[in-house]
Image: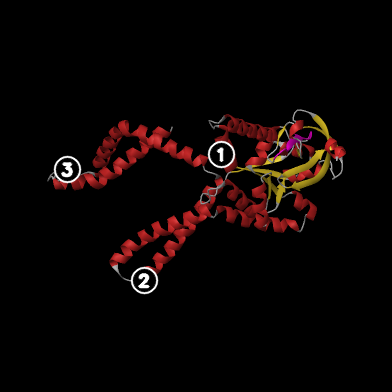
Amino acid sequence: MLKRIVQACFLITGGTLGILLIPELLKLINMNDIPIVSNSYVTAIIGAIIFYLITFWAVDYVHEFIKWTEDSLIKIPVTDVLFGSIGLIFGLLVAFLIGFALNAVKVPILNAVAPILLTLLFGYLGFQVGFKKRDELLNLFTNRIGKKKSGEEEPEKAAVQQLKILDTSVIIDGRVADICQTGFLEGTIVIPQFVLEELQHIADSSDVLKRNRGRRGLDILNRIQKELAIKVEIYEGDFEEIQEVDSKLVKLAKLTNGILVTNDFNLNKVCELQNVTVLNINDLANAVKPVVLPGEELTVQVIKDGKEYHQGVAYLDDGTMIVVEEGREYIGKRIEVLVTSVLQTSAGRMIFAKPKLLEKAL
């Protein structure tokens, strides 16, 4: 069907050019006195035949180009097309108004060239502004709609409906899926397209460990989207002027007034500095861990040596690391330790202890 349309366009173009150009060509070679050829119907038919013959060679190339253009446009997010088109229309309108004002100046060259230059310049600028500012414009509209609805909704419901934006680290971690399943994380889960691209890049890595982490992250996303009763949306926009994924996440959270869900300690600090609401999975894990106080006794197995001299390292069942002073000689053994101090941060929790046998000896 598309090829037929292309051929029809070639025939119409050939007929039109035949009417306009063939008489001029005949004048150049002094053959304009031929009565048959001077007839406009005849020149149209000749031009159409010439272009019809050209279609046998060109129609496949034109067909492939149109299909490529169609596929490219389909892949572009609808918000990009919409706001880019709005910007283009606004730019062309400005160009028309300026060109209309310049018509009052009776300068032939200016009146002929200025409208073309203004159309190209303002059309390009309008499209670029609309395309690159699409996220801010979209956020402006959504905020206005949200303000209108906020008078009808209760504050608690409005808070629940805040977007929860997942970063790469929390997806790979996997605990967010369990949190969603228990119902502690409510609202709409947003997965940005640039986070998906980063996960895919990690999953395609030549390094085995990174590849496994990337594939685990993709599996977690499939589980959240298909198995859990929670709304999941894919944000297809991007911030091309920003290179770092973390910076893109922070900007997206600002634009959408969303909450960033992460377990990255550094990203947590950046969000706090930029007044972006953040939910740190490690903070939640620390909050629900059993409280360990200095002076309590624990039974642990020392599995390796620590960074400092004569230190040993053990772990609780929940993964909390215990640094055992003077515990290097007990590596591979299960001993009772006495908690001396607890260090708890967004990066995790660390317990410092010393062997109870050593305490008794003292």
Dot 1 amino acid type:
Glu
Which element carries disc 1, helix, strand or loop?
Answer: helix
| Cα–Cα span, label 1 and label 3 | 67 Å
List the single residue furthest toward the bottom.
105
Indicate which label's residue lies in the foreground, 2 or 1.
Answer: 1
The answer to whether residue 26 of the structure is visible from this angle is yes
Within-10-Å neighbours for mark 3: few <14, some 14–19, many 20+: few
Residue 240 placed where, x, y %? 51, 49
> To which residue does mark 1 refer?
197
Which sits in the foreground, 303 or 119? 303
Tell me the residue at 13%/44% (across/down): 31
Q: Nearer the viewer, mark 1 or mark 3?
A: 1
Q: Residues within 10 Å of mark 2 (few under 14, many from 20)?
A: few
Look at the numbered discs 2 and 1 and tell me whether their residues touch, using CB distance below 8 Å: no
Please name whichever residue, 45 or 226, is drawn nearer the observer in this view of the structure. Answer: 226
The tag on residue 35 is 3
Identify which residue, 135 or 221, lies in the foreground: 221
Compare marks 1 and 3 and give the one earlier in the sequence: 3
| Residue 343 as seen in the image, left or right of residue 1 | right
Name the residue furthest left.
Answer: 30
Alpha carbons under labels 2 and 3: distance apart = 46 Å
Give the residue number, with chain letter if any, for mark 2.
Answer: 104
User: Which quarter of the rendered picture does the C terminus lie within?
Assistant: top right
Q: Where residue 176 sits in the image (x, y, percent)?
A: 72, 39
What element does badge 2 sit on? loop
Left or right: residue 160 compared with residue 7: right
Q: Which residues are magenta?
A: 309-317
| Lower sequence index among marks 2 and 1 | 2
Residue at 51% across, 55% down = 130
**Residue 274 visible in the picture:** no
Residue at the extreme front: 362
